[in-house]
Image (tube, helix red, strand yellow):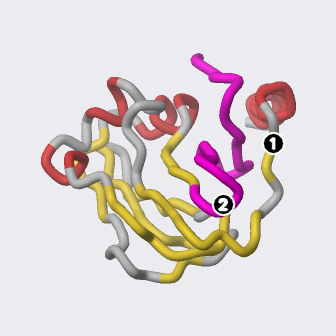
Amino acid sequence: MNYPENIMYAKSHEWIKFEDDTTAIVGLTDYAQSELGSIVFVNLPQVGDEVNAGTIFADVESIKAVSDIYCPVSGVVSEINEALLDAPESINDSPYDSWLVKIADITEKSELLDVEAYKAFIEEEEKNK
């Protein structure tokens, strides 16, 4: 598994990289994509949509199932990664380059983990399977 150190993680397996205090990009972690299997469809919010920390803002369909994606922050969607609409499998190929959305005007953050805390969370989750 790949765990970059320059980003934060949510317990719902999204990563978030802050560009500044009020803007960040969000994607799915390497762990999430490996658990999902081959991703075949991505449903993203619209630019301008308000999103809230801890709530569903998108979903992905894999060969296994449709899975909800939770937003790690509250704010406004300022950009979506339109390339994913035509090539959702790029999340499997390179999860940390295949961001889903950019969120601006961030007002609230859910509980975010650094890389070590996220690794520990994954280990605990794997033990409980």
Q: Is residue 93 magenta?
A: no
Kind of residue indicated by mark 1: Leu
Q: Position of residue 117 (x, y in %)?
A: 86, 33
Q: Secondary structure at mark 1?
A: strand
Q: Is residue 120 left or right of residue 55?
A: right
Q: Position of residue 82 (x, y in %)?
A: 22, 54
Against 58, residue 38 (above or below) is above
Nearest to the observer: residue 114 or residue 91: 114
Span highlighted in magenta in the image:
1-23
| Residue at the limit of the structure toward the left, as seen here | 86
Residue receiving disc 1 = 113
Q: Quadrant of residue 124?
A: top right
Against 25, residue 35 (above or below) is above
Q: Residues within 10 Å of mark 2 (few under 14, many from 20)?
A: many
Nearest to the observer: residue 36 or residue 96: 96
Kind of residue indicated by mark 2: Pro
